Amino acid sequence: MQLHPFRPRLLTALRGYDATRLRADVAAGVTVGVVALPLAMAFAIASGVKPEQGLVTAIVAGLLISALGGSPVQIGGRPAPSS
């Protein structure tokens, strides 16, 4: 069985990238950030750690998910705890 070499989807997604897509991506990022960052702080507090640790975790995880996996229609992020 032959394995294909690893190639992040980010490289494929950047082909044909223009200013229109950049504006849409920035608007989507701001919208997600408004929701995700306070949620990350709340999860940290609920877990008994400092809110700053939740922010760092959310930012690092978001960058890794964005850079190494997924597709333009796949969303990655912190799962909400079940009640």
Image (spheres, rainbow, N blue to C red):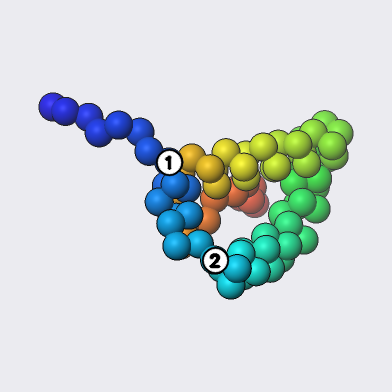
Label 2: which residue? Answer: 18
Q: How many marks?
A: 2
- The residue lying at 47 percent from left, 48 percent from top is 10
Q: Nearer the viewer, residue 68 or 51?
A: 68
Tag 1's secondary structure? loop
Q: Residues within 10 Å of mark 1 (few under 14, many from 20)?
A: some
Tag 2's secondary structure? loop
Q: Quadrant of the N terminus?
A: top left
Give the image quarter of residue 23: bottom right
Amino acid type, label 2: Asp
Vertical placement of 67 versus 48: above or below? below
Q: Nearer the viewer, residue 44 or 52?
A: 52
Label 1: which residue? Answer: 8
Give the image quarter of residue 20: bottom right
Q: Nearer the viewer, residue 82 or 78?
A: 78
Q: Position of residue 47 (x, y in %)?
A: 76, 35
Disc assigned to residue 29:
none
Dot 2 or dot 1, earlier in sequence: 1
Amino acid type, label 1: Pro
Q: Position of residue 73 (x, y in %)?
A: 46, 62
- The residue lying at 22 percent from left, 29 percent from top is 3
Does the rendering let one see residue 46? Answer: no
